[in-house]
Structure formats: structure tokens, C-alpha cells
Amino acid sequence: MTARRLLQLVLLVQLLAALGIALAAVRWLGFGPALAAAFGCGCVALVRLAINMNNFVLAAFFASPTPPAFRLGPLARLRLLAEEFCASMFYTSWTMPWAREGLSVFVDSAALPVLLVHGYGCNSGYWAHLLPRLARARISHAAVDLAPVAGDIEHYVDQVERAVEHLRAQTGAARIAIVAHSMGGLVARAWLRRYGAEQGNEHGCRRIVRVITLGTPHFGTGLANFGLGVNAAQMRRKGGIPCDWLRRLDAGEDAARRALFTSIFSHHDNIISPQTSSRLPGARNLAFGGVGHVALGRNPRILDTVMAELAALETEGSLRA
């Protein structure tokens, strides 16, 4: 099953639940239609908020110590929760249930093309806030939809390979960059392990200039122990030890491969815990605070940083095939 179809079903269940609560409110509480509808939607939203808050509670059990410079006061914590809740509601109820893979090519642009790789349970709709920025900068880009939603990360690798080659063919670019969220960063690393062995430049891979990961559990997350699917099992971390798949991935990378990466993460990530699991030795690691996991895709500070990282790359004009 694709994430799009799954999220459509989840959205349908939520709508039916809201309708059922509204009908009950009309019959048993004497509410008018408008008030009953608001009450039903509000109840569903409260359940969604409770789920979101529970993720923060679970993350606290596995959390790494927060550096003093990143510690938050009560109001900042409320802003953190509000932003993460709004991001979750926006993506799962608006963009991702209807999203499909897309490609935008700017033929007269010298900017390096970018492939966008989403995370666990998501699809290309996750990039709704980054896409307009890429378009304004005239950066050619493509977004891949990984399927099935609970599949093996190794299975996604061939999908990424096809997306990389399609983007290169459509843009005429010899090399591209990848921006990946959460599990997508692990997919990118697994892709490099299988397809990045070609030597051709000082970085050891002639098709990739940079991989930018957002909130990727490079060394696993305790919350993956509650996740479903082969991919969730591949992100697990128990007793402070990453699972076998993650350890094999780590062992297969050298300094040149790690130098390709920029890892952007938040010390308040509510899904990747310990949060320092996103710190990748040998990579350019950029730490933030006060941003939740889903909100990484829409937070202005994070998006500004992604765009700055892309702007710093070599121009495509010197990299034509």
C-alpha cells in the first residue's frame, strides 16, 4: 500500500468519526448542526493532539541530554508543540493524502538539480513548503514516492536509483544533490552503498555532490520499537545499540562517503530519540533547538539552512554530462 492511499483511509476514518460524534451531539446533547460539526471536528483534533503529545512523552524516555544552549522555557515548549501539531495536521490531512511524484526542470538554470526523498509513512507531499523555495531559486527538482509504505529500505534503493537517473536525464546534469527527511536519509545512504561505488571524483561518487538529511536516525531511534513494517525494524535501537542493519550500514562507509553529508537535526526531535542519533561522524552536522520532527519540513530556520547548503554547492554549469 502507498502512503497516499493509507493516509486517505486514515482521513476517511477521521471524517467518519467526526460525523458520528456530531450526530451523537445533535441527538443526545441538543446541539445545532454547526455547533455539532465543530464539536465533532474538535474531538478528532484533540485525539490527534494527544497522539502528538504522546510522541514527546515517549521520546523523553530515550532522549539524549539537551545542551544548555538549546534548553527551552515553558513558552518555547508550547511553541514547539504547537508547531509540530500544526505541521502534522497540515501534511497528513492536506498535502500527503493527494500528493504524487513530481518533476520541475528549469532548462536555463545553472543550479544543481535536487532529488527529494521523504521519510517513514510519508510521501512527496511532505515537501510542500520546500518546493516553492526551490522553484523561486530556479533549482530543478524531483520528488520520489517510496512504496510500499512499510517496505524494506533496501527495496526503496532501486526506486531512488531510477529517480536519480530520470532527474539526470531530464536536466542533462552529470551530478545532483539529495535532500532527505528522516528514514529518507537512510535510504540515501543505502543507495550510495549499492550504487555509489563508481569512482570519478575526490568524493568517491561521480553522481552526487551532497546529501542533506533532516532528522535522520543515522544510529536508530527508540520510537522505532513501536513502529510497524520492515523499515521500522531497520531503524530500531535497543539498549542504546543500533540494530544490525544500521551497524552494517555504518561499517560500509568511509571518510570520503561521510564527507558528502550534511545532517540537520533538532535537539527537541520528538521521533528521533536519542536526538544525537542524527549526528553522523565525518559529516557536516548542524544542530537546532525548538523544532519537532515533522516540523523540520516547514520551519523557516531549517528551510533557510537547506537553501543555504544548496546555494553553497558547485554550480551545474561546470557539471554537465
Image: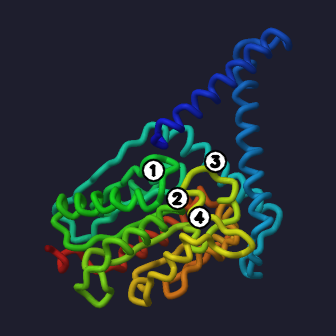
Q: Residue under label 3, please give it.
A: 86
Q: Choose between 305 and 194: the one closer to the eye.
A: 194
Does 19 sit above or below residue 199?
A: above
Q: How far, Cα to Cα, is label 1 from label 2?
A: 8 Å
Q: How far, Cα to Cα, is label 3 from label 4?
A: 25 Å
Q: Mark 3 and mark 4 in contact? Answer it, CB < 8 Å.
A: no
Q: In the structure shown, which secondary structural element does the residue marked by tag 1 occupy?
A: loop
Q: Residue under label 1, please give it.
A: 128
In this view, the residue farthest toward the right is: 29
Quarter containing the C terminus: bottom left
* Residue type at numbered disc 1: Ala
Residue drawn at x 32%, y 56% is 142
* Relative image position of residue 219 (x, y in whole percent): 60, 74
Residue drawn at x 71%, y 18% is 20
Q: Earlier in the sequence, mark 3 or mark 4?
A: 3
**In the drawing, does residue 272 fall left or right of residue 248?**
right
**Quadrant location of residue 187?**
bottom left
Residue 297 is labelled as 2
Instruction: Single out the mark in the foreground, 4 or 2.
Output: 4
**In the drawing, does residue 102 fall left or right of residue 272?**
left
Q: Is residue 140 visible?
A: yes
Instruction: Single out the mark in the foreground, 4 or 1.
Output: 4
